[in-house]
Amino acid sequence: MSNIHPSAVVEDGAQIAATAKIGPFCYISSKAKIGENVQLISNVNILGDTTIGEGTIVFPGAVLGGGPQDHGNEFLPDARLVIGKRNVIRENVTMHAGTPKGQNPLGDGTPVENMVTYVGDDGMFMVNSHIAHDCVVGNNVIMTNNAVIGGHVRVGDGAILGGNCAVHQFCRIGRKAMIGGLTGVDRDVIPFGIVTGDRGHLRGLNLVGLRRSGFAPDVVKSISKAYMYIFKSDEDNFEIRLQKAHEKYKDNAMVMEIVEFLTLSEQGRRKAMKAAQD
């Protein structure tokens, strides 16, 4: 307990690892679970049932585990926020707990419980970034200053969200996708895609990110070729090309990741259109 500053407020019942460091003027709720070597520098608020994995560092002004900005679900005692290991959470970041509406609407197999917001390992969440209720954020994600994601958003491993971008609720951001600064995202973004613009448009693939991640040139070339076929070809229409791509690229795991992602997005879009007509 010597690592807890005397000005910090720690409610009875909080579970704090012996190696964690709790700085001045922090508040930790009775349900909080703080892992080994976690650092709360100062003026950090850990609310409700929030778990913070080992090695994570949290900077002043962050508020983690607060009630969702969702009418009727603002202060639910069973709501949780689970944050993984070795994250860097900078000043004034907010991450909200889940709601009873947390199930995945597209059924893409993501293991999501109701009432829980998940953040993975090794991420960096820069100043004023925001993760809303029921989101699932993968590993090695970077959210730049003022990047915000709405409720129920899924962010794949290694994705980068540029400064002041905004992602609409229920959208999915694929693995290693890149969202440009000041971009508004109101639809799913394919794995490895790059999206920019006031209202985000798919501009191509995140080729620089793929190369920096160590993917071989022939792998990058094959993904680029598949992208051109699916999105730029004059053959048939988009839905038929997508169906053909299932067979055409069945032996290429990374291309199939894009194809399967798009298939789920199309299914979700059709379900939404049908629901609107009923």
Image: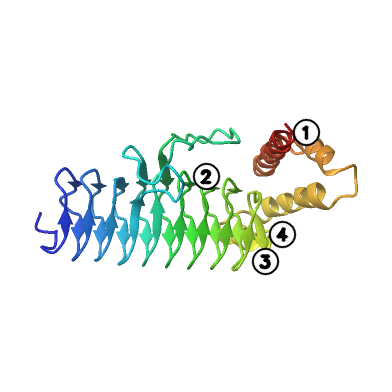
Q: Are marks 1 and 3 in contact (CB under 8 Å)?
A: no
Query: Looking at numbered disc 4 in the image, what kind of residue is underneath it?
Result: His
SS for dot 3: loop
Q: Nearer the viewer, mark 2 or mark 4?
A: 2
Lower position in the chain sequence, tag 1 or tag 4: 4
Q: Which residue is mark 1?
A: 247
> Mark on residue 25?
none
SS for dot 4: strand
Cα separation, mark 1 vs mark 3, equals 35 Å
Query: Looking at numbered disc 2 in the image, what kind of residue is underneath it?
Result: His
The picture places residue 255, in percent across and down from the top left corner, at 69, 44
**20 relative to 33, above or below:** below
Label 2: how many Cα within 10 Å (few below 14, some 14–19, many 20+): many
Q: Which residue is mark 2?
A: 152
Query: Looking at numbered disc 1 in the image, what kind of residue is underneath it?
Result: Glu
Q: Nearer the viewer, residue 43 or 21?
A: 43
Lower position in the chain sequence, tag 2 or tag 3: 2
Q: Are marks 3 and 4 in contact (CB under 8 Å)?
A: no
Q: Nearer the viewer, residue 167 or 275?
A: 275
Q: Which residue is mark 4?
A: 201
Query: Looking at numbered disc 3 in the image, what kind of residue is underneath it?
Result: Asp
> Mark on residue 198?
3
Quadrant for the N terminus in the image? bottom left
The residue lying at 20 percent from left, 55 percent from top is 20
Label 4: how many Cα within 10 Å (few below 14, some 14–19, many 20+): some
